[in-house]
Amino acid sequence: MDNVKATVFVVDDDEAICKSLAMLIEGAGLNAQAYSSAQDFLDDYDPAIPGCLLLDVRMPGMNGLELQAELAKRRIHIPTIVITGHADVPMAVQTVKSGAMSFIEKPFGDKALLDDIRKAIALDAKSRRVQMQ
C-alpha cells in the first residue's frame, strides 16, 4: 500500500467542474479521479487506495450528504472536503457533523483548496499508519 500514490476522488455532477478540478489537482502533482455521480463513485471506489474525497453537496440522485451517510454505513472512512455553490449554515453544520473535514463554498481559491486537499491526504496517511500498528 505504501507504493500506491494518494488519489483525490472528485464527485460532482457538473462535468466542467470535474474536469477543471482534476486538471488543478493533477497540475499540483496529485492523482485525481473524477465521477459525475455519487453512485458511480461507490461502484468504482476501492478503500485500499489512499487519498481523500472532494464532494459536491447538491447532485441529482444520491446527493453529497447521502453519500457521506452511505460511506459511514459501509464503515469507509475517507477524509472528505465538501464543496458547494449553494451554501447555508445548516448545510455546513450537517456536512461537518457527517464527518467532512472541510466545507468550501464555490467559487473558491485554488491555493485554499489544494491546501485542504494536502491536509486531507496527510490525515488519511496518518490514519492508515495507525491502523497498520
Image: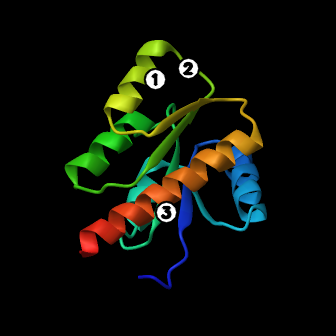
**Residue 131 placement (x, y as % from top left):** 26, 68
Q: Secondary structure at mark 1?
A: helix
Which residue occupies 50% across, 80% down?
A: 4
Q: Can residue 63 be seen in this snapshot?
A: no
- The 10 Å Cα crowd at callout 3, few under 14, some 14 to 19, many 20 or more, is many
- The 10 Å Cα crowd at callout 2, few under 14, some 14 to 19, many 20 or more, is some
Q: Identify which amino acid the numbered label 2 is placed on.
A: Ala
Q: Identify which amino acid the numbered label 3 is placed on.
A: Gly
Look at mark 1 in the image and give the residue it sits on: 92
Q: How many marks?
A: 3
Look at mark 2 in the image and give the residue it sits on: 87
Q: Residue furthest bottom?
A: 3
Q: Identify which amino acid the numbered label 1 is placed on.
A: Ala
Answer above or below: position of 100 versus 8: above
Contact? badges 2 and 3 (CB < 8 Å): no
Which residue occupies 30% across, 50% down?
A: 71
Q: Secondary structure at mark 2?
A: loop
| Camera-nearest label, 2 or 3 | 3
**Residue 18 placement (x, y as % from top left):** 67, 50
Q: Secondary structure at mark 3?
A: strand
Q: Can residue 101 be seen in this snapshot?
A: yes
> 109 and 61: which one is in front?
109
67 horizontally vs 11: left or right:
left
- Figure quadrant of residue 104: top right
Which residue occupies 74% across, 46% down?
A: 16
Look at mark 3 in the image and give the residue it sits on: 51
